[in-house]
Image (tube, rainbow, N blue to C red):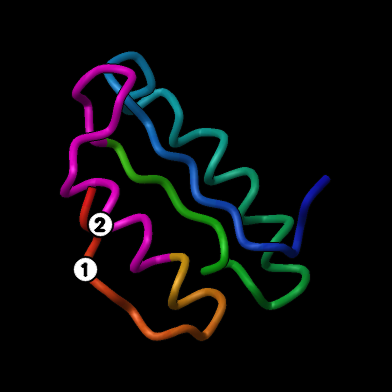
């Protein structure tokens, strides 16, 4: 329902490999808009709260999606 807007699923301890099926299906829809790289999955596998390195990756991905300057994440 959000295609073709950017979407990043950030997975924790219980999301794991099973979540890839949803990303693969979403990519099919995004491909209709020639934007299959605008949907992604970051599996940090470390509980509900993402660790700092995962947040940094997520912010860099969002900066790329919105054509912004990437910066280091500092909590």
Look at 34% across and 14% down and name the residue there: 14
Q: Residues within 10 Å of mark 2 (few under 14, many from 20)?
A: some
Pair 2/1: label in front = 1
The residue lying toward the viewer, choosing from 57 and 19, is 57
Above or below: residue 5 compared with residue 22: below
Could you say whether the residue bearing mark 2 is in a helix, strand or loop? Answer: helix
The residue lying toward the viewer, choosing from 43 and 71, is 71
Above or below: residue 66 compared with residue 75: below
Above or below: residue 3 compared with residue 36: above
Image x and y of residue 20, in percent: 44, 36
Look at 41% across and 23% down and name the residue there: 18
Residue 35, label in figure? none
**Residue at the extreme right of the image, as rendered:** 1
Q: Quadrant of residue 13?
A: top left
Image x and y of residue 24, in percent: 53, 46
Image x and y of residue 55, in percent: 29, 48
Look at 25% across and 57% down and name the residue there: 56
> Which stretch did the figure color magenta?
44-61
**Number of numbered markers:** 2
Q: Quadrant of residue 39?
A: bottom right
Where's the N terminus, which quadrant?
top right
Residue 56, label in figure? 2
Distance CA(mark 2)–CA(mark 1): 6 Å
Left or right? Give the position of 56 relative to 7.
left
CB under 8 Å between callouts 2 and 1? Answer: yes
Q: Residues within 10 Å of mark 1 (few under 14, many from 20)?
A: few
Look at 44% across and 78% down and name the residue there: 64
Residue 56 is a magenta residue: yes
Q: Which residue is mark 1?
A: 72
């Amino acid at each position: 329902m959000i295609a073709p807007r950017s979407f990043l699923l950030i997975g924790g301890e219980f999301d794991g490999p099973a979540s890839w099926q949803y990303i693969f299906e979403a990519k099919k829809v995004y491909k209709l808009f020639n934007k299959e790289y605008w949907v992604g999955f970051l599996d940090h596998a470390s509980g509900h709260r993402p660790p700092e390195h995962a947040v940094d990756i997520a912010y860099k991905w969002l900066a790329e999606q919105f054509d912004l300057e990437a910066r280091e994440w500092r909590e």
